[in-house]
Image (cartoon, coloured by chain):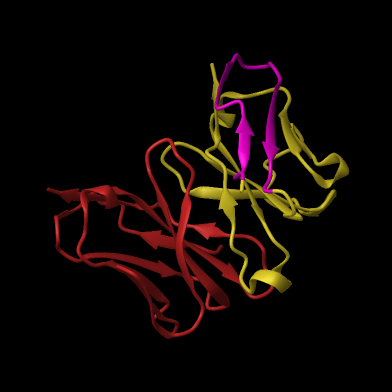
Chain colours: A yellow, B red
Amino acid sequence: EAGVTQFPSHSVIEKGQTVTLRCDPISGHDNLYWYRRVMGKEIKFLLHFVKESKQDESGMPNNRFLAERTGGTYSTLKVQPAELEDSGVYFCASSQDLRFSGANVLTFGAGSRLTVL
Amino acid sequence: QKEVEQNSGPLSVPEGAIASLNCTYSDRGSQSFFWYRQYSGKSPELIMFIYSNGDKEDGRFTAQLNKASQYVSLLIRDSQPSDSATYLCAVTGAGSYQLTFGKGTKLSVIP
């Protein structure tokens, strides 16, 4: 079974530019999450999709961040315009419906490292 | 604000010893507790989860939960150099899909 795939693995951009991160979840996983780890801090929740719908976007830092999941398959996270404080590692994760797993067991991707200069 | 606290380490143990990793959490409503292992530059990988008070064993790993003390721990028996990684504690509340993470404890197993 393929895991959670993220692209790119590393992106270096200048302040004010736009970056789009992509996540392909495990096939059949309706739940898709974005998390972020800023240097020196803990991994923090950004948002949660159930299929194509945003279930919870309470962790999104501001309106420069836009997440989409068209068709309920892969997801993109766009940062526009990027600021210095957006640098960090962006993790995507997916999970099955809780009715099947009993606990919300997330499988994470390897992350996309974003460096804003 | 919900918080999860872990000692950042590094925690160094000799090969074959027991490594003990600890985690405290602030939200009494927390219901599920997870331990993830993360090698440098890799994805966090679930080791085990626990939601009932007491111990849960899986191979060399034992998770211990004490909800009254708001404390969860992970014991690794017969530690191996391949166990050297950062261990992340995470919790969720009742009916919540959000994981709240600690900063992680870096474990180093010395051959």
Q: Residue at x 75, y 54 (%)?
A: A28
Residue at the farthest front position:
A1
Q: Is residue A21 left or right of residue A53?
A: left
Q: Nearer the viewer, residue B31 or B18?
A: B18
Q: How many marks?
A: 0
In the rendered image, residue B29, in percent from the top left (x then y), is placed at 58, 77
Q: Nearer the viewer, residue A6 or B99?
A: A6
Q: Quadrant of residue B65?
A: bottom left
Residue at the farthest right position:
A71
Would you place residue B41 above or below residue B83 in this image? above
Q: Residue at x 51, y 48 (%)?
A: A43
Would you place residue B56 above or below residue A40 in this image? below
Q: Residue at x 32, y 66 (%)?
A: B22
Image quadrant in which the C terminus of chain A is located: top right
Q: Residue at x 73, y 73 (%)?
A: A99
Q: Is residue B32 left or right of residue B38?
A: right
Would you place residue A97 above or below residue A41 in this image? below
In the rendered image, residue A14, in percent from the top left (x then y), is placed at 60, 14
Q: Nearer the viewer, residue A21 or B84?
A: B84
Q: Quadrant of residue B17?
A: bottom left
Q: Quadrant of residue B5?
A: bottom left
In the rendered image, residue B60, in percent from the top left (x then y), is placed at 29, 68
Residue A6 belongs to the span the image colors magenta: yes
Q: Is residue A89 left or right of residue A6?
A: left
Q: Nearer the viewer, residue A12 or B44?
A: B44
Residue B86 belongs to the span the image colors magenta: no
Q: Which residues are drawn in magenta?
A: A2-26
In the rendered image, residue A85, in percent from the top left (x then y), is placed at 56, 30
